[in-house]
Image (tube, rainbow, N blue to C red):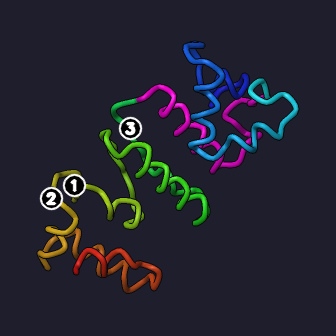
Amino acid sequence: MFEGTVRGNLDPLAQHSDTEIWEALDKCQLGDIIRAKPEKLESTVVENGENWSVGQRQLFCLGRALLKKSSILVLDEATASVDAATDAVLQKIISQEFRNRTVVTIAHRIHTIIDSDLVLVLNEGRIAEYDTPAKLLEREDSFFSKLIKEYSMRSKSFNSLAILQT
């Protein structure tokens, strides 16, 4: 995020109407927060968005991508620095609002990619495997399968594994 206003951060080229901006804010669950501010869309954003939480900054970025109608979304550890509740909100928005778009997710948290159409696993900087999560899980020798097993042992809250294996 850059120094300016909410409007300027979401629509830096001033190509969208207020209605479109509010729709994007509502979809990324920032609408009520912005409406509660006296200056609304003209509310201040300081350099790097320091006056917003890390989660809100991530939601702003999704809002910008929604407004722009980006056909490709690249997420590099998008949920690494947010709490579990914000992580869940981000994942829900991504799965609902970007379902017909290409989403490239770079992640270390397995649950952020388990619902992906395809997974590409890198090992020592090289492509080790590439397939659907379900097919990779079927192969006990796959890196992905081993990662899931390790994650499952460490986390009791990982429910998607059972769903994929049924």
Q: What residue did someone put label 2 on?
A: 131
- Few, some or many C-alpha atoms within 10 Å of disc 2 (few <14, some 14-19, many ≥20)? some
Q: What residue did someone put label 1 on?
A: 118
Q: Position of residue 95 (x, y in %)?
A: 41, 52
Q: Earlier in the sequence, mark 1 or mark 2?
A: 1
Q: Residue at x 35, y 74 (%)?
A: 160
- Few, some or many C-alpha atoms within 10 Å of disc 1 (few <14, some 14-19, many ≥20)? some
Relative to 9, does residue 62 appear above or below in the rendering?
below
Badge 1 vs badge 2, beta-carbon distance below 8 Å: yes
Dividing the picture into quarters, in which one does residue 141 lie? Answer: bottom left
Which residues fall within the magenta stretch? 44-69
Q: Residue at x 30, y 75 (%)?
A: 148
Q: Position of residue 24 (x, y in %)?
A: 57, 34
Q: Position of residue 58 (x, y in %)?
A: 57, 44
* In this picture, residue 129 sits left or right of residue 85: left
Q: Amino acid at mark 2?
A: Asp
